[in-house]
Amino acid sequence: MDAAPNTAHHVAYTINGVIRMATIEPWVTLLDLLREEFDLTGTKKGCDHGQCGACTVLINGIRINSCLVLAVSRSGSVVTTIEGIGTPDQLHPLQAAFVKHDALQCGYCTPGQICSAIGLISEGIAKTRDEIREGMSGNLCRCGAYIGIVDAIEEVLAAAPDANSLP
């Protein structure tokens, strides 16, 4: 009987400014790689079907549900997770606005909400509250903090209308 073929793949990413490499099976999602291999647990596993947005990260500046992406397909990419956005001593403007507007309760969805909001701002298409709501519709909050989330994003948009002007 022949041995099973080697299915492992070598992958490399720049994650939150740090080059990281791993050897993974082809079926590993980016979400599982981030959480299990790189111990970046800020990105949450919610539905594991791309319906809740808890796993949203930025890949090359574009927001994406990491549970739907095979990690091997994005090798070489620049990935930003919530751990790469702000610090406890210097919050990103969206993090500060989320706190100010009480845009979180349990906090489980917050990392995905913030990554998605950064992507939304960089897309430059959300100018009104309705456009913000529509643009964030892929990110669910079971606690119902939607008004605070929209308020926070609206405040940051007013102060810095594009992601290039965010720190």
Image: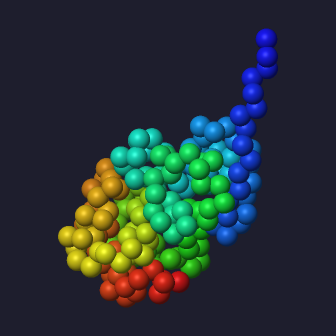
Q: Which residue reaches farthest left?
A: 130
In depth, the one of 44 and 122 nearer the eye is: 122
Res 99 visible: no
Height in image: 123 above or below 136?
below
Report the number of discs. 0
- In this view of the protein, which residue sits in the foreground, 2 or 83? 2
Q: Answer with left or right where residue 14 lies relative to residue 110.
A: right
**Is residue 6 positioned above or below 166 on the image?**
above
The residue positioned 55% from the left and 67% from the top of the image is 60
Task: State which quarter of the image contains the N terminus.
Answer: top right
Q: Position of residue 144 (x, y in %)?
A: 27, 56
Residue at 59% in and 50% down: 73
Q: Is residue 68 left or right of residue 124?
A: right
* Res 134 → quadrant: bottom left
Question: Residue 93: image x %, image y %?
Answer: 46, 79
Q: Residue at the location (54% across, 62% down)? A: 59
User: Residue lying farthest top?
Assistant: 1
Judged left or right of residue 21, residue 67 is left
- Residue drawn at x 24%, y 71% as measured from the top left: 131
Q: In terms of image quadrants, where is residue 48?
A: top left
> Residue 118 location in percent, x, y?
44, 71
In terms of depth relative to the viewer, which is nearer, 19 or 73? 73
Residue 79 visible somewhere in the drawing: yes
